[in-house]
Amino acid sequence: MINVNSLSVSEVSALNRLREPGVNKILTVLESELASTKQKLVHANEMGRIHRLQGRAEAFEDLLKAIEESSKVKER
């Protein structure tokens, strides 16, 4: 999990900029990749592959959550 509170002001600003109109295509790509990874996870049958996909999905979820939380931290 990304602790947004421990990031520098410039790092929080960079995450927050990803929410701006025109840049939000990155969010769409991240959300699409997360959905694709979850779909692959449903069909995976090998433990090594399952673990890799779980890690990948968790990383996408953490990044999306950090982007969402960046606006709250920036307001402080």
Image (tube, rainbow, N blue to C red):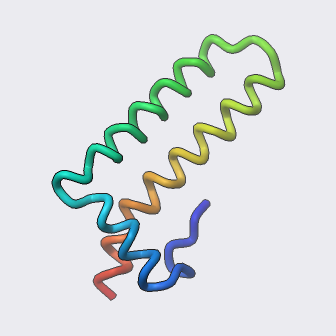
Q: Quadrant of residue 40?
A: top right
Is 43 drawn above or below residue 76 in the view shown?
above
Instruction: From the top left corner, tell me how far across and down residue 26 is, in percent.
Output: 34, 46
Q: Is residue 53 left or right of residue 10?
A: right
Residue lying furthest front in this view?
22
Instruction: From the top left corner, tell me how far across and down residue 59 is, in percent.
Output: 59, 47
Identify the residue at horizontal 57%, vertical 71% (top origin): 3
Identify the residue at horizontal 28%, vertical 83% (top origin): 75
Is 43 drawn above or below residue 69 in the view shown?
above
Q: Is residue 69 left or right of residue 43?
A: left
Q: Nearer the viewer, residue 56 or 42?
A: 56
Identify the residue at horizontal 83%, vertical 25% (top origin): 48
Q: Nearer the viewer, residue 64 or 29?
A: 29
Instruction: From the top left corner, tell me how far across and down residue 39 is, in percent.
Output: 52, 19
Is 66 drawn above or below residue 72 in the view shown?
above
Instruction: From the top left corner, tell me how far across and down residue 52 is, in percent.
Output: 73, 32
Is 10 drawn above or below residue 47 in the view shown?
below
Q: Nearer the viewer, residue 9 or 66?
A: 9
Residue lying furthest bottom in this view?
76
State the quadrant of the N terminus: bottom right
State the quadrant of the C terminus: bottom left
Q: How many marks?
A: 0
Q: Is residue 18 left or right of residue 7?
A: left
Identify the residue at horizontal 48%, vertical 34% (top origin): 34
Q: Is residue 20 left or right of residue 2?
A: left
